[in-house]
Amino acid sequence: MIPRYGTIRPGQSYRPRPGAYALLIRDGHVLMTLQDFPEPDYQLPGGGIEPKESAIAGLHREVIEETGWRIRPLRRIGTFRRHCFLPDYGWFAEKICHVWLARPICRLAAPSEPGHSAIWVPCRDVAGLLRDPGSRAMAQMVLGRAASARPLYPG
């Protein structure tokens, strides 16, 4: 079963919205997005997958738009559902969030998505900054391994 977050309002319809998100780790830090509208919010870079777009293509596009960085996806780490209102679109969504562990390779440009900034955050601080409980759970699952002998990046 896919974990579900957010309150489902009785009688409210929700549009399915698949999305691709990345936990971007490099040198003990995580590359996050700070979205300043409608209020400041730290997020895992990513977003909706467009019709006829693959999840990996959507992941690359969203990360470049929101951070300006090119990435190398390593492995899918999980999926969660989140029921929420999307103020940018004006409708309620059932977000199906696919999350990948990825490595930032090179900075191409500043973020092109309006109101987004790319922020490097120490791994130990990431969970405390993520308001979205699904993203926070994914980050805690992966970053909790950082102290173990199991490497985050195999090979």
Image: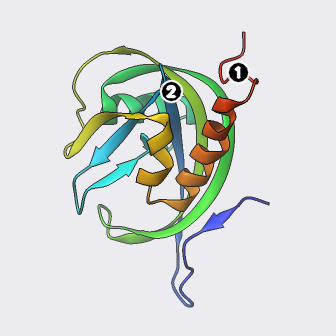
Left or right: 139, with 79 as reference point = left
Q: Amino acid at mark 2?
A: Ile
Q: Earlier in the sequence, mark 1 or mark 2?
A: 2
Q: Position of residue 110 (x, y in %)?
A: 21, 26
- Image height check: is 56 above or below 98? above
Closer-to-camera residue (38/62): 38
Residue sitting at 32 percent across and 31 percent down? 67
- Image height check: is 5 above or below 137? below
Total marks drawn? 2
Residue sitting at 49 percent across and 25 percent down? 28
Q: Position of residue 98 (x, y in %)?
A: 61, 45
Residue sitting at 56 percent across and 64 percent down? 82
Indicate the secondary structure of the residue bearing disc 1.
loop
- Image height check: is 30 above or below 71? below
Residue 48 in view: no
Q: Amino acid at mark 1?
A: Pro
Indicate the secondary structure of the residue bearing disc 2.
strand
Disc 1 and disc 2: Cα gap in Å? 12 Å
Left or right: 68, with 104 as reference point = left
Image disc number at residue 151: 1
Left or right: 103, with 142 as reference point = left
Other-residue count near label 2 (Cα within 10 Å), few / some / many at <14 / 14–19 / ≥20: many
Residue 113 in view: yes
For disc 2, the marked residue is 25
Q: As drawn, which residue projects farthest toward the bottom?
A: 11
Q: Position of residue 123 (x, y in %)?
A: 49, 35
Residue sitting at 47 percent across and 19 percent down? 27
Image disc number at residue 60: none
